[in-house]
Image: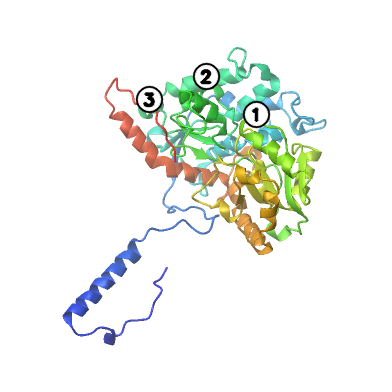
Amino acid sequence: MALKNNTPLSSSSFPCSIPSLLLSFSLLCTLFFIFFNRPSSISNDPTSISQFSQKNSLNVFIFNLPRSLNYGLLERYWALPPDSRIPSDPDHETGSNRKPGNLEYPENPLIKQYSAEYWILGDLMTPQNLRSRSFANRVFDAKEADVIFVPFFATLSAEIQLSLDRSVFRKKSGNEDYQRQREVLDLVKNSEAWKLSGGRDHVFVLTDPVAMWHVRDEIAPAMLLVVDFGGWYRLDAKSSNGNSTERIQHTQVSLLKDVIVPYTHLLPVLRLSEDQPRRTLLYFKGAKHRHRGGVVRERLWDLLVNEPGVVMEEGFPNATGKEQSIKGMRTSEFCLHPAGDTPTSCRLFDAIQSLCIPVIVSDRIELPFEGMIDYSDFSVFVSENDALQSKWLVSHLQSISKKQREKFRRNMALVQPMFVYDNGHPGGIGPILPNGAVNQIWKKVYQKLPMVKEAIVRDRRKPPGVSIPLRCQCI
């Protein structure tokens, strides 16, 4: 970085009077101070390995849980019959070479979209001499750690229960997922590390909106890695003494302590050099009928389904549906991303990997890695009120020039690697992508440390018997 005017100052530039000389000297000192003390900005390269100094890293200790609560759940999954919730289960097809004991993560789209827990643990389990590309430094003494990672495959645990017997999921009796949640919490909360911090420096991965549903109030102090806060609204509403959910208190989740992580994309990556002309204006594939905030989707569907240049398809990207989604996203200029049961879905990250400009219609959305990247550089944000006006959305998208669309796609190509988890190693254990999702998550966890450490210190100085009420932690 340089000053705009680099022309050398000659001796004739300075009059001989002492007042003028002193004034010029003061001006130079001021410029020197501004130049060398101006705050640095986040790197313009969204795929930069880190916005922090390379000397910085995050010290992570893995809490010792039984294997049955992580990789053992994968072994159990592969021993199960096909998932009755989907028409065709790719993991249990006839002739599949996947067998019990296999440590690959499921291809079942209901489960694969939530695979962050698998890749994050895989990074930490990689031999230290192969981990030079990871922002996280694994330590083997909890006292040396910045954070304690709890390696519970909470999503896989929940999805196994849902596939076996959905009727008991909200109950405790007869619910194997609840029993596993309880086992994790009993072990963790009785540890010295939890008692020292009140759990604030512990990290749980809860990408499925129903993961660890029964014990959320107990893990609320911890750092939670979630895809959004949508699954927490109902619990927060209960804690707000009946106040409207329009003003969410976030007594259990907060952008101050928690990290928004991406879904795992289900569609293959399309490189910018492979992009072809796009004939469709706007594309959407998914379920029309949703709950809660997803009612907007149904109204959008009715407005758009007969619009020229718009394709609205019902379905889920499995079997033939996946091929339809690949074709639809790769041949469309824009991909619609309305809220569903929760504000986000894996559809957004499929669109990014397909270079289909996301059109985000979700007023309460939280997005991964904000502050590292600016989604408005490659996405179109539309308020729900505007989107629900007849003809408004199509007209708005048509007004975006070809030049601007091409710029969106170039910017999208730069950030594609940030949303990729897969490291290409069997069992997920091996060196991670330096610019991939796992490293970006570790960097976001690192950003939360000052607030977390402050909360721990504040809690320690609290006199015995003093109760501090839960507060809104809104940003």
For the view shown, which residue lies furthest in the front direction? 390
Q: Which badge, 3 or 1, comes first in the chain's sequence?
A: 1
x and y percentages locating residue 46 in the rendered image = 54, 55
| 406 horizontally vs 39: left or right | right
Secondary structure beneath dot 1 equals helix
Which residue was labeled with disc 1? 74
Q: Are marks 2 and 1 in contact (CB under 8 Å)?
A: no
Which residue was labeled with disc 2? 182
Residue 195 disc label:
3
Residue 20 disc label:
none
Q: Are marks 3 and 1 in contact (CB under 8 Å)?
A: no
Quarter containing the N terminus: bottom left
Vertical side of 182 occupied by 381: above or below: below
* Front label number (3 vs 1): 3
Q: Amino acid at mark 2?
A: Arg
Q: Residues within 10 Å of mark 2 (few under 14, many from 20)?
A: some
Q: Amino acid at mark 1?
A: Leu
x and y percentages locating residue 172 in the rendered image = 58, 15
x and y percentages locating residue 359 in the rendered image = 65, 48
In front of the other: 277 or 459: 277
Q: Residues within 10 Å of mark 3 (few under 14, many from 20)?
A: few
Secondary structure beneath dot 2 equals helix
